[in-house]
Image (tube, helix red, strand yellow):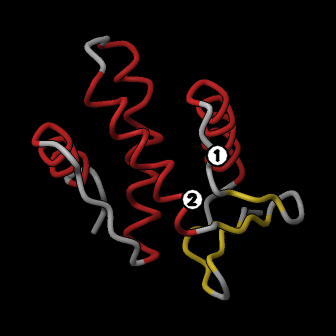
Amino acid sequence: MSFVFDIGDETVWSPGNLVAELYLGTVDTLTRLLDQPSGLTDLAGTWFTIEPDTYRNFVAELLRVYTDSGHWEFRCLLRGPLIVSIGILHRAGIPLAGQTDDEVAALAELRTELPL
């Protein structure tokens, strides 16, 4: 069994249950901590739609707080969901660009973790 994440009629991610639930739990926490909507909508428990602009803005905010933080534990905890989110954007063909030199460098480094 797996989850499905769609943008329009295209499935951009279909992780297994454990991976999806861990990701969604983390995203839920981050939306509350950052007071930022994620762009993910639960349609049927394991079927989600992604609103592209809202999701890109959410991931951009994750990147911003990741690069702005000097707290190593926070950065470690944020790193995994941020890489997954960057990967989802990549699969969907949605561009994400850093807004500062630190963001550009972090984004380039984080992208090396993606199985492209």
- Residue 7 rendering spot, x and y as whole percentages: 62, 77
Q: Identify whether 80 is placed above or below 114.
A: above
Q: Residue at x 16, y 43 (%)?
A: 100
Q: CA distance from mark 2 to mark 1?
A: 7 Å
Q: Which mark is residue 104?
A: none
Locate residue 116: give its quadrant.
bottom left
Pick whichever, 77 or 106, lies toward us: 106
Asked whether disc 2 touches disc 1, contact meaning CB atoms under 8 Å apart, the reply is: yes
Pick whichever, 26 or 66, lies toward us: 66
Whichever of labels 2 and 1 marks the residue nearer the N terminus, that label is 1
- The local crowd at label 2, few if under 14, some if 14 to 19, many if 20 or more residues have their Cα within 10 Å, is some
- Residue 35 rendering spot, x and y as whole percentages: 62, 32
Q: Secondary structure at mark 1?
A: loop
Locate residue 101: give its quadrant.
top left
- Residue 26 rendering spot, x and y as whole percentages: 61, 34
Q: Residue at x 37, y 29 (%)?
A: 65
Q: Secondary structure at mark 2?
A: helix
Dot 1 corresponds to which residue? 37
- Residue 94 rendering spot, x and y as whole percentages: 40, 72
Which residue ends up furthest to the bottom in the rendered image?
A: 9
Q: Amino acid at mark 2?
A: Thr
Which residue ends up furthest to the right in the rendered image?
A: 44
Task: Say whether residue 109 is left or right of residue 113.
Answer: left
Image quadrant for the N terminus?
Answer: bottom right
- The local crowd at label 1, few if under 14, some if 14 to 19, many if 20 or more residues have their Cα within 10 Å, is some
Q: Residue at x 59, y 32 (%)?
A: 30
Q: Which mark is residue 54?
A: 2
